[in-house]
Amino acid sequence: MTGTARRLVAAVPAALLVAACSTDTSDPSPAPATSASSTPEASTSPEPEQSPSEAPEPVSADDLDVATAVRTVRHLAGDVGPREATGPAFARAADWVARAFTRQGYDVARQRIDVPAGESWGVAVPAGRSVNVVATPPGLDPSRPHLVVGAHLDTVPQAPGAEDNASGVGVVLAVAEAVARHDTRLPVVFVAFGAEEPRGPSDDDHHYGSRTYVATLSAAEREAVRGMVSLDRVGVGSTVPVGSAGESDPVQDSLLAAARRVGVPTVPDPRQRSSDHWSFVRAGLPGARLGSTPYVGYHSAGDVPSVVERAQLERVGRLLLEWLAPR
């Protein structure tokens, strides 16, 4: 865990934390599975005391294990399949992601999302409940400066969602894995958002999970969010789209600078509001998006693991780790 994070005091918004969903026994990871806590205070094993000489090294782009992202895409889109936000497949996926974060050493909690009925990409979807899976460094004080990195876990009903958005979740897990063993410039909260996909035509029929996350932050916690990055459709192409909600954004600028430092080709994508970063930006918080290259199979049954390119997952993961690294 980051050296900074271990010095902070634990605090997670408790009002919307709910118990774990049903356990998915198909977890392909060789590591022993540990369920997330059913209480607001998620249980983790105590970390050993470290002497100054054992303090974590700064994280770098070279710390990425892209195999973690590839395995995630194959499991979520291949084994689990379509993950409509209120359905049982989404609940299984949320359990799987929660266990992955827990194994990495994070405190994991679920944040409840009430989702209305609607129409998602031509398919009627019921009202129900979804969750955000929130992974925080042990000891995090959310009123102190920190960063947020997230990706939506749900899909439209007809799509296995390999690129949209198992690719984003996969890179989030791979980056979280590297960050758990190294130091970052600020503590990082990782979120797998529920109910991002549209349930109607307007802006308010979209991004339910991230809007809930932002709405539950106190004034001090909002002030503490120094940057948010949403990973959405990050596994296709040879350049990485870096999107901002307006013509420019300080988070977009810093992501582009990080990409230059590690030699990752990018393309700026202005006025990009179709992902979870928009929930932060519209509330006055700094945020940007990675990903959005067009591809065959978007929001269809053709969005399968073979669509996703390992090299692009690696580019995005390296860019993001460089953005998180101490400077």
Image (cartoon, rainbow, N blue to C red):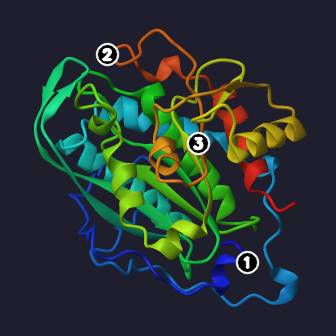
Depth order, front residue of 94/280: 280
Distance, label 3 to label 1, CA atoms, is 22 Å
Quadrant where the C terminus lies? bottom right
Q: Residue at x 35, y 19 (%)?
A: 299
Q: Which mark is residue 301?
A: 2
Disc 1 to disc 2, C-alpha distance: 43 Å
Question: Where does residue 213 sit, x and y in percent of width and height?
Answer: 39, 59
First-in-chain label (3 vs 1): 1
User: Can residue 95 be seen from the camera position used here?
Assistant: no
Residue in the image at 81% along x and 47% along y? 62
Whether residue 132 can be seen here: yes
The residue identified by callout 3 is 171
Q: Is residue 213 above or below residue 88?
A: below
Q: Nearer the viewer, residue 35 or 157?
A: 157
**Label 2 element class:** loop
Which mark is first along the chain, 2 or 1? 1
Q: Name the residue that disc number 1 marks.
A: 3
**Residue 185 image offset from top left, x and y in percent:** 76, 65
Neighbor class of circle 2 (other Cα within 10 Å; few <14, some 14-19, many 20+) is some
Q: Eyeballing the image, is 233 above or below 288?
A: above
Q: Is residue 71 left or right of residue 320?
A: left
For badge 3, the amino acid type reads: Val
* Quarter the N terminus occupies: bottom right
The answer to which of marks 2 and 3 sits earlier in the sequence is: 3
Near mark 1 (Cα within 10 A), the count class, few <14, some 14-19 or many ≥20, is some
Amino acid under disc 1: Gly
Residue 154, placed above or below residue 146: above
- Residue 123, image x, y percentages: 17, 21
At label 2, the amino acid type is Ala
